[in-house]
Image: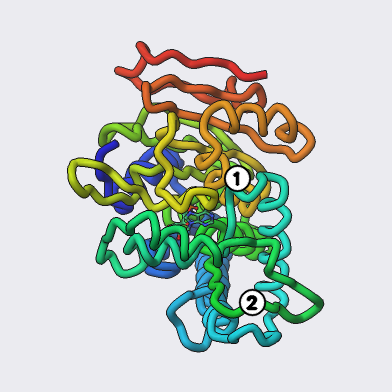
Amino acid sequence: MRFRTLIAILSACLMAGCSGVSDVSDKAVDSFFAMDTYMTITAYGDGAASAADAAKAEILRLDSLWSVTDENSDIYAVNNSNGSPQQMSDDTIDLLEYTLDICEKTSGAIDPTIYPLVEKWGFVTEKYYVPSENEINILLQHVDYTKLSVTDGGIILPEGMMIDLGAVGKGRAGQLAAEIVREHGITSALLDVGGNIQTVGSRTDGEAWRLGLRDPFSDGTIGVISVRDKAVVTSGGYERFFVSDSKEYCHIIDPHSGMPVDNDLASVTVIADNGTLCDALSTALYVMGCDGAVSYWKDNGISDGFDLILITDSSDIYVTEGIITDFALSDGYEHIEVHAVS
Ligand code: AMP
Ligand code: MG
């Protein structure tokens, strides 16, 4: 794994995503910073500017609910509630309930109560630190999504526990922002929500959006995914990590061990209509490793409506049947072995 900045990811995705778009009179491009990352909304057609404005406003509104550091956010309130019930907005309740469902289905591979470990390893402040086994074990006592109770309008988080929606918030924000763009009558838009891509309709020339899939081992684009009206979300250790004593530690933590994930996967890309599902699963399946991810797809992929592109540490690619004809290797990558999963 090598370090790649988020900006590089974004520019690669956008380059591929926008290539070949024919000229239309109305085009709006809005780039801004939210949820700790750069986002770009590109919309085409009549009303593109107001659609992009409304989508951006929605993302900023959700950011203010889900920020871990904003003292006015829902998440800040629950993290400082000392075990007492907290009233939350419907958006937060909905996202937490959805996330808890995926926690259950993935046997806790994704767990929003992992936050104390994410913080301890230094991924919140970028003051990186390798905790001792003892420190990890103490913090792991506060990691257990089953102890979080979500009721109508409120959340109870036991004292000592903290949550973070970092693994799902951008996916949900992209999904809700795309709905707003569609409500404005837009049939062609690309929302880049910090590397999570949410497409609306197709390109203005009627062709599918062509999204670049990043090579986790270089600056390159390993392949191109053609989609319409879908979300495409990638998780990978290469997106954020630090090195200590020649060892790499990535930002996705295995909730069972408290350790940064270090398995046979370099990246997991999930493609589905539902951006929240994509974001939750990309993180969870990255934790589960290649065999775990493939077997999760075999059990749930068709019923839940998602496809996967898995890139292993040895540069093999596994592509599930629903996306295989819409995936092509980039020039120069023809030597890579693509395994069809069905
Ligand atoms: P993503 O980029 O969507 O894969 O989400 C990764 C982010 O979610 C990290 O930067 C952490 O803030 C948080 N996180 C890390 N590991 C987990 C985990 N196992 N479950 C839930 N959230 C996690
Ligand atoms: Mg995620």
- Secondary structure, mark 2, is loop
Residue drawn at 19 percent across, 41 percent down: 246
**Quadrant position of the C terminus in the picture:** top right
Q: Residues within 10 Å of mark 2 (few under 14, many from 20)?
A: some
Residue tagged 2: 158
In the image, residue 175 lies at what x, y percent? 62, 57
Question: As rendered, which of 303 and 12 lies closer to the eye?
Answer: 303
Mark 1 or mark 2: name the one nearer the start of the chain.
2
**Disc 1: residue Cβ within 8 A of ligand 2's nearest atom:** yes
- The image's mark for residue 281 is 1
Q: Can residue 197 be seen?
A: no
Residue 317: where, in percent of width, then height? 47, 22
Picture coordinates of residue 125, whole percent (x, y):
31, 69
Amino acid under disc 2: Pro
Q: Nearer the viewer, residue 301 or 222?
A: 301
Pick the front one: 165 or 83? 83
Q: Is residue 200 left or right of residue 32?
A: right
At label 1, the amino acid type is Leu
Question: What residue appears at the point 27 percent right and 45 percent down from the top-left corner?
Answer: 4
